[in-house]
Amino acid sequence: MQRHSPLPVALPAAFSVASADDLGVSAGRLRGRDLGRPFHGVRTRSASTPLSEIRDLCRAYAPRVAEHQFFSHETALVLCGFALPGWPYRPRVHVSAHRPRREPRTVGVIGHRLQARETAVRRTPDGLPVEDPARAWRQCGTLWSLDDLIAAADSLSFDPARGASRRALWEEIDIMGDVRGGILARALEEARDGVRSPRETRLRLLLVREGLPEPEVNWTLRDEGGSFVAELDLAFPRWKVAPEYDGRVHAEDAAQFARDADRWEAIRRAGWRHVRCLDHHVRGRGIPALRMVVAALVDAGWRPPRTMSHNLLP
């Protein structure tokens, strides 16, 4: 079995060939089979280190990121923890630079040379340079569907200090322009503040696009004495109907499931109809979820519009 000489302790888990050369590591040692080669000019200390997650890929590519380059587009939103298209969509590694500087050109990375503009790059907690979230969202306008852009706008505006307010997103469109026939403006028109998850966005869009009333988002339910009962993802206060998207396949956390069950009972005791929409209810066109919510609203006295499809009516 071949024994490999130890690498200098100064080299991190992922390092550039140039930095290893500066520390006296030979070209032969850098060709060792014990080292990973995730990108041209980059080595990792272990060839068996899994790099299936985009965060891991970005950390591995970081030694190659020049001072003027940064992770952008969907990659920046991944690294900052904002909503992305759901499975089976797999985000790619995007790295950008502003003109006249050059973008990277290497296998496994999509490089972009952006318009000359003052930089707004920030750093993730682990030190990766990422595009400003509002700019990254606009850049995704060339990659994502309308509903995915709406979900991302909802996610960004939930915590504007960390992400971006809807006003900031509008300003980014005003400054840099819209794309694909105005898809970004259409997304912001359907985005709402206070949405915690893309699942909430998906359910809300299903409901309003089928002619149901616009639900309140993250509405605080209180009892007759004013005491807090629950925060409702979506709520129709006039009819006391609360639809929620629960995407769990089964209760992996028994304690959390018990707390949720107590919460559902508290909502019902307050005189509300709680409509729990599971993943299979919302899949595809979401017909089962729509039927459940329509039935609850009709039972509460809501009159559906004449244009509503008959197969949604109870």
Image (cartoon, rainbow, N blue to C red):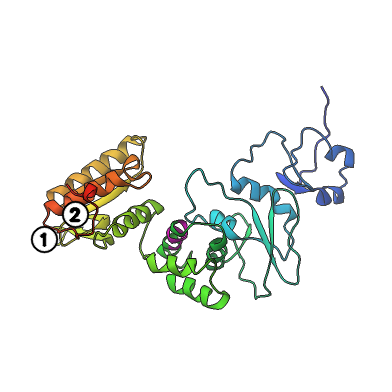
Q: Which residue is mark 1?
A: 225
Magenta residue check for 151: yes
Q: Is residue 210 left or right of residue 45?
A: left
> Which image quarter: residue 35?
top right
Image location of residue 174, percent across then percent down: 52, 77
Q: Residues within 10 Å of mark 2 (few under 14, many from 20)?
A: many
Image location of residue 287, percent across then percent down: 30, 46
Magenta residue check for 186: no
Image location of residue 283, percent across then percent down: 37, 44
Q: Which residue is mark 2?
A: 241
**Disc nearer the start of the sequence (2/1):** 1
Q: Is residue 105 left or right of residue 26?
A: left
Query: Residue at 63% of width from left, 57% of height from top?
Result: 127
Query: Which stretch is magenta?
Result: 148-153
- Give the distance between the C-alpha atoms of the residues marked 2 and 1, in whole angstroms: 20 Å
Instruction: Report the magenta stretch's main SS.
Output: helix
Q: Which sits in the foreground, 84 or 30?
A: 84
> For the residue marked with disc 1, what is the amino acid?
Gly
